[in-house]
Image: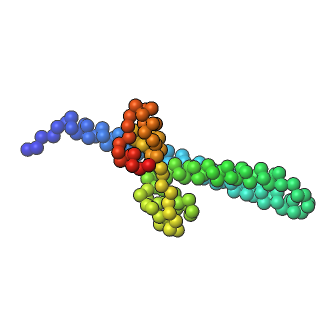
């Protein structure tokens, strides 16, 4: 008859609980980011409505002052930028790359977008020895008292 080691069983249960806790935390973070995107999108919708009202008013009154239009457009641009940042963070969390051309999420190892065919941007590698861009030189490595491997140096 096979014996069951209680310590091994408890260790496995702990590992499973830790993994489940980590996954739950990741899902919670993703949910927060999704909620933030929805909130920003709703704000943008209101800003577009406000922009339309201001433009209509200017057309009807003949007032050519664009300061208010520029201010609203700037607010819209700020929200668009924040949404793009959040989507990039979420894509990173899900091991995906976002196409800068069409916004489609692609597998991280993709070279071209599966939707539009555009070449996907490749994140610059970071030198493992000095935490600088892969194009580091030996003086930076020497300053950090380490040396890049030959492979890292040839990436220059």
- Can residue 1 be seen by looking at this rendering? yes
- The image shows residue 23, relative to residue 62, as above or below, that is above
Q: Is residue 151 above or below residue 117?
A: above
Q: Which of 78 and 39 is in front in this view?
A: 78
State the image coordinates of residue 3 (x, y, percent, origin top left). 12, 40
In this view, the residue farthest toward the bottom is 116
Picture coordinates of residue 19, whole percent (x, y): 35, 43
Q: Give the farthest residue toward the front.
A: 139
Tell me the quarter of the image containing the N terminus.
top left
Quadrant in which residue 129 is drawn: top left
Q: In this view, does 141 lie to the left or right of 33?
A: left
Q: Please indicate, yes or no, whether residue 130 appears anywhere in the rendered image.
A: no
Image position of 80 (left or right of 60): left
Number of numbered tags placed on the structure image: 0
Residue 107, above or below 30: below
- Closer to us: 90 or 20: 90
Q: Residue at x 46, y 36 (%)?
A: 140
Q: Nearer the viewer, residue 33 or 137?
A: 137
Residue plotted at (60% across, 52% down): 83
Specify whether 115 is left or right of 48: left
Question: Image quadrant of residue 46?
Answer: bottom right
Q: How is the image coloured?
A: rainbow
- Residue at (43, 56) in percent of width and height: 108
Q: In this view, does 156 lie to the left or right of 80?
A: left
């Amino acid at each position: 008859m096979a014996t069951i080691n209680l310590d091994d069983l408890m260790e496995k249960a702990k590992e499973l609980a830790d993994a489940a806790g980590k996954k739950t935390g990741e899902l919670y973070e993703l949910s927060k980011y999704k909620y933030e995107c929805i909130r920003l999108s709703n704000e943008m919708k209101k800003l577009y409505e406000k922009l339309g009202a201001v433009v209509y008013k200017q057309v009807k009154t003949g007032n050519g002052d664009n300061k208010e239009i520029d201010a609203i457009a700037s607010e819209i641009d700020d929200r668009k930028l924040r949404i793009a940042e959040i989507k990039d963070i979420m894509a990173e969390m899900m091991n995906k790359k976002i196409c800068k051309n069409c916004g489609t999420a692609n597998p991280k190892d993709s070279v071209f977008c599966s939707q539009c065919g555009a070449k996907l941007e490749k994140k610059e590698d970071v030198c493992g020895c000095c935490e600088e861009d892969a194009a580091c030189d030996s003086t930076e490595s020497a300053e950090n008292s380490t040396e890049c491997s030959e492979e890292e140096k040839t990436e220059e």
